[in-house]
Amino acid sequence: MTGEVVSYSGPGPGDSNSHIVEPPIENDAEIGKQNSSPPSSPRRCPFQQYVDADKLGRISGTSVLDSPGIGSLGRRSNGRASFMGVRKRSHLHNKTAEEVERIVQAGKIRELKNCIRSHQWLPFDCVRSRLWQIICSVHVKDKATMDSLYWDTVKQIYGTHDLVTKTGPLPTFVEPSFQMSYYLNETGIQVARRVVNIISYSCPDITYAPSLYPITCLLLHYMSEEDCYACVSHMVASKKTKFITQTKLHFETIWRTSMILCRRHAKSAVSYIAKQAGENSIVESIHQQWLNCIFKELPFQHLVRVMDCFLFEGRKVMYRVWMAVLLLFHRHLASLPPNNRPALNKESVVESTLFDFCHNLPCSPEKLLRTAYGVRNFSSSEMDRLFIKTEMYLKSKAAASASMPNNKNTMIPRSRSSDVLPTSQSQVNIQMMSHTLTIREGSRSPGLRSRSLGLFPIQGVRSHAADYDRLLTVWSWLPVRITMYQPELLYTTEEHGCSMTTFFNRVEQHEPTILIVKTTTEEVFGAYCSSRWAERNSKDCHGGRQGYFGTGETFVFTLVPNEIKYPWVGISATSSAEGPSCVRHAAELFMASDGHMITVGGGKGQAIWIDENIRYGKTDMCLTFNNPPLASTSDFEIKVLEVYGFQNV
């Protein structure tokens, strides 16, 4: 990739000195009173050389106070009063970069989180010359290697470290309508394009990431080019904290997840909009625009504060901010006289009204974040669980639609999209959904698979023990290779009666199986059994009948009242220094049966024990899974027992 070389050259490999633009100061006396720095220390602007200082300096009419939008300038607003009001309230009490860095070095994560959430650093605050680098240092460990890799890749692609005027087109994963450059100058825009192109070259599996380009442009306000690359690279590859979507499937999953979360945690706002709109499609269209409201419409000082929290906490910050926007939007509309409230009965009216509200947000960044973090009972585990469930639903829905026969007169083109290619984010989801051991040595690879409904083919399952959402949860816990097969109901007491003989006749030759128990008290729990029940008749090395059998893939779970998976304790032991050898024999008692009962788990008790009449059972804590009793009482009476297998495994 070549282009015209210009005089500007980036810092280059090994040069971390960032150029600081001196700000135009309108009233030195006024700012001097509010600045906590000693009078003798020179006031310096934190912005990089990639920023248009003139646009940022005009804080009295346009520029930094307005929503940036496409083309950097935004629209005129009267935001100076609120902007300076924030300075008067909070600037005197903000921590310095050195204080924040000491918190990071001490490993005080909770204190750092509270610090980032509560301190109101303004866009012009000199602490910002280092703040984002310090926050990102929590995640990016091998910074020197990342810098070297970046400049080596730049040299490989462009042939020079100098910035070229033609960096080539942006990658296809960048959304054309979502290319906000904010207040970057021409050099900054070219640097942003170069960083995004290097990300695309390094991560070819990204197919749709609309937020990646605006995030890159925001980072370049306060970061050098290589620092920006290191930060964005971490966001793309992060396995623990999620930042950026990478496929259209994930993008749809995100906004649908946000819609479900808002219905739970911003119920008043969503109910009001739904009542006014009257159509579910209008409500959905609002949630599809959630990133537009945040990245394109929020005033710059609000967006910068949101980014402070986002860089540390990830995507859940955006969920919270979106819920806060809807709650504030509802309060704003409710405060208007009835005859002045807009009629939210058309999609275009709802969107334009919401966009205008976000663009001229009538509150400070402090209040926005206070509202966002005031949403209670919202957790990362809930977010992750809803994300996985929504993703599985969309995959199953798409696969089911693809399997439907087409009308003879209607030729629907077959999709050739790469949306389902595995990404670093999808691999994280796979790790979340499956904690399995290696397949036993000597086991054969799966043969030809039967036709199924896709990766999560459970839409056709009708269970008397668990509803569809509970089945999705169980499905998310299975080893990934098993989710490729079509499930089938092998045995149910509703149809096949309560007989252990019938149970074994219908179940024993299938591997693996899922046991689901529903008690007369409406509690639901069960087990994933990794081996055939026929192994109960196998002989040990001494010719005696084998007591316990199974593998470490076996696990037990509860669905009602709580959805909890209890994997084999040896899985955590495999990551320890001692390895699996430290797991006692009592913790390797997976499955057992003598023809008159079945047991899952052992050691000081059984996780699940069922009698030969399949009417009564017992559940206790056991060493194999380190689980508590799976029901509210140790002894339980069975209302429904279901066993599922998989076709052609």
Image (cartoon, rainbow, N blue to C red):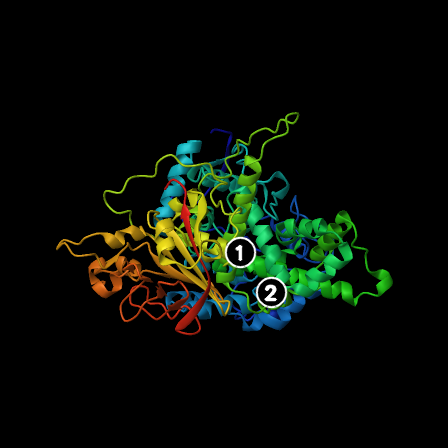
Q: Is residue 69 above or below residue 648?
A: below
Instruction: Identify which amino acid the numbered label 1 is placed on.
Output: Asp
- Residue at 63 percent of width and 71 percent of height: 88
Where residue 410 sits: x, y (%)? 65, 27
Closer-to-camera residue (225/368):
368
Report, in whole angstroms, how far the alpha carbon at label 2 lies from the one at label 1.
28 Å
Q: Is residue 447 above or below residue 335?
A: above
* Element under disc 2: helix
Q: Please give left or right for residue 219 compared with residue 422 in the image.
A: right
Q: Is residue 506 visible?
A: yes
Closer-to-camera residue (571/206):
571
Which tag is nearer the camera, tag 2 or tag 1? 1
Where residue 497 sits: x, y (%)? 44, 57
Crowdedness of circle 2 by 10 Å Cα count: few (<14), some, many (20+)?
Answer: many
Tag shown at residue 428? none
Closer-to-camera residue (234/561):
561
**Within the image, what quadrant is residue 617 found in?**
bottom left
Number of labels in the image equals: 2
Q: Is residue 46 visible?
A: no
Circle 1 sits on which residue? 469
Q: Please give left or right for residue 17 compared with residue 598 in the image.
A: right
Circle 2 sits on which residue? 372
Report if the CB atoms under discs 2 and 1 are less than 8 Å apart: no
Crowdedness of circle 1 by 10 Å Cα count: few (<14), some, many (20+)?
Answer: few
Instruction: Identify which amino acid the numbered label 2 is placed on.
Output: Ala
Q: Sequence order check: which comes first, mark 2 or mark 1?
A: 2
Where residue 546 sits: x, y (%)? 21, 56
Image quarter in which the C terminus is found: top left
